[in-house]
Amino acid sequence: MTLRTEDLAQLIQQRRSCYLFKDKQSAPLQTNTLKTCLEAALWAPNHKLTQPWRFWVLGSQSQAVLASTYAALRAGSRAEVDSEAYRLHYTSAVEKFLQIPQIVLVGQVLSDDAVIRKEDYAACACGIQNLQLMAWQQGIGVQWSTGPILQAQATYDLLEQSPERIELIGALYMGYVQGDCNNQSAKRKPLESVSVWLD
């Protein structure tokens, strides 16, 4: 069965980045559902089939370990270490991170060739978009974060990876949507203002 053009257009236009998720205990993401989203990512275009993407699906233990890194970075950017304000920010950040129903880290295998490296980043971004569309179609929201946790050595240590070989390019925070993400701004410039049609 072929997907109708208008249905595909609607899916693309309705997708939003989501920050509020249903409780992971009452609405957990099932493994097969998550695999369906990841499989969609694999079908993104990638020049010469380099398939540069790598995915790390965090379980409860690895999420708890990463929560401390996330919290330290967040608290450290807001208050002096060892202060009461730091402690409050740290505790709040840990709780926030642990409430995320599912976290998937996305990395790009780094080519020695600068052109291929640029192409591979584009391929990974396409893969993430495929994943987001597949998730959205199933009522799952995704927030693609590029925060400092992706540059932290502690994150690479958790994954047993080297930043010289793999560059982390996204932390995908996922969960069943709570509320209406469609209320978020969806303004886009009109096509006429961003396109030039040449003879």
Image (cartoon, grey):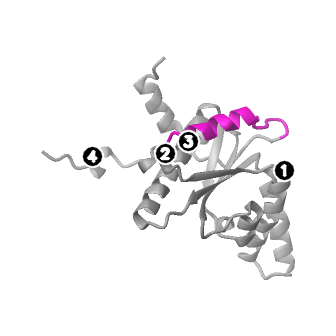
Q: Position of residue 110 (x, y in %)?
A: 54, 63
Crowding at mark 1 (Cα within 10 Å: few <14, some 14-19, many 20+): few
Q: Nearer the viewer, residue 88 or 61?
A: 61
Q: CA distance from mark 1 to mark 2?
A: 33 Å
Q: Report the mark closest to the observer, 3 or 1.
A: 3
Q: Specify which label sits upstream in the sequence, 3 or 1.
A: 3
Q: Amino acid at mark 3?
A: Leu
The boundaries of the magenta stretch are 25-44
Say which residue appears at 72% left-offset and 43% top-offset: 21
Badge 2 crowding class, 10 Å Cα cut-off, few under 14, some 14 to 19, many 20 or more, is: few
| Front: mark 1 or 4 | 1
Secondary element at image label 1: helix
Question: What amino acid does circle 1 point to?
Answer: Ser
Q: Give the labeled residue for mark 1.
A: 60
Q: Of helix, strand and loop, which one carries label 3?
A: loop
Question: What residue sits 86% from the left and 81% below the top?
Answer: 82
Q: Nearer the viewer, mark 1 or mark 2?
A: 1
Quarter location, residue 168: bottom right
Q: For the residues marked 3 and 4, what is the alpha-carbon distance in whole angstroms? A: 32 Å
- Left or right: residue 37 versus residue 43 is right
Q: Which residue is mark 2?
A: 186
Please tell me which of labels 1 and 2 falls first in the chain.
Answer: 1
Q: Write the residue at 81% across / 81% down.
A: 81
- The answer to if 34 sits in the magenta stretch is yes
Q: How many marks?
A: 4
Q: In the rendered structure, find residue 192 and report the number of the disc placed on it.
A: 4
For marks 3 and 1, give the CA distance.
25 Å
Residue 42's tag is: 3
